Image (tube, rainbow, N blue to C red):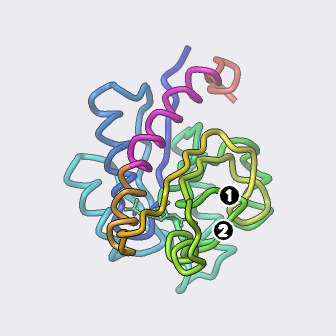
Amino acid sequence: MYLPRIAILISGKGSNMEVILKACLESELPADISFVGSDNINAKGLETAAALGAPTRVFFYKRDGRKAAEEAIASAIEETKTDWIILAGFMKILSPDFVRRFPEKIINIHPAMLPLFPGAHGIRDAWEARADHTGVTVHIVDEEVDHGRILAQEEIEILPDDTLETLEERIHRVEHRIYKETLIKHFLENPISIEEREE
Ligand code: GAR
């Protein structure tokens, strides 16, 4: 059995990426990082990843357009023999063509109980809807946005004295635990075979 190779895609702070990267470095998560990639050259998480010794890559959506940027991501994935693509706050929508190229190999975390509150503002949308619960979802990415087979979900109560900030903080805390735990379990249950690695 091979240690799976993962690429983590981010757009901003990269706090989920940092937890996953550290778990790999400490062998808590049995995976090797092939690279941390971003559509945003100024993403804070790129600095964090580089400081922790991970290779980083930038994909230029604005300059090159989505098709070329996705082609660059796919080339990087193939070149580095990456097995799993881990989205951690990657705020670009991957095209159906891209998703079809890596079936069941792209995993995402979303800060709400999908199918409720998909999109770029899952926490704020639940807050503004005055929902009494929200949560966190880890799922396989399919061709629809924030959609696909759910691997793990955890509900979080919105408390009467919560502010948007305290809610965000609690959600991020749950994300950091659930993403790591779910990946550990998923990689164990779906080992990379010799045939797959040698393709
Ligand atoms: C996380 O809350 C993640 O669930 C969310 O972006 C944040 C990134 O934070 N993703 C989505 O909303 C996807 N639709 P981070 O950069 O600190 O990990």
Residue 192, percent across and down?
Answer: 62, 23
Residue 53, percent across and down?
Answer: 24, 46
Quadrant showing the C terminus: top right
Do the CB atoms of the residues marked 1 and 2 lie less than 8 Å apart? yes
Q: Is residue 7 above or below residue 39?
A: above
Mark 2 vs ligand 1: CB under 8 Å? yes
- Give whichever of 20, 47 is nearer the camera: 20
**Which residue matches tag 2?**
118
Q: Is residue 155 above or below residue 73?
A: above
What residue is drawn where x is 52% and y is 35%? Answer: 183
Q: Secondary structure at mark 2?
A: loop
Magenta-highlighted residues = 174-189
The main secondary structure of the magenta stretch is: helix
**Which residue matches tag 1?**
114
**Residue 115's quadrant in the figure?**
bottom right
What residue is drawn where x is 75% and y is 44%? Answer: 149
Residue 61, percent across and down?
Answer: 56, 79
Residue 164 falls left or right of residue 198: left
Three-letter amino acid code at the position of disc 1:
Leu
Say how many tags the image has: 2
Residue 25, percent across and down?
Answer: 29, 33
What residue is drawn where x is 69% and y is 64%? Answer: 116
Outermost residue on the bottom side: it is: 63
Quote the CA–CA distance across marks 1 and 2: 6 Å
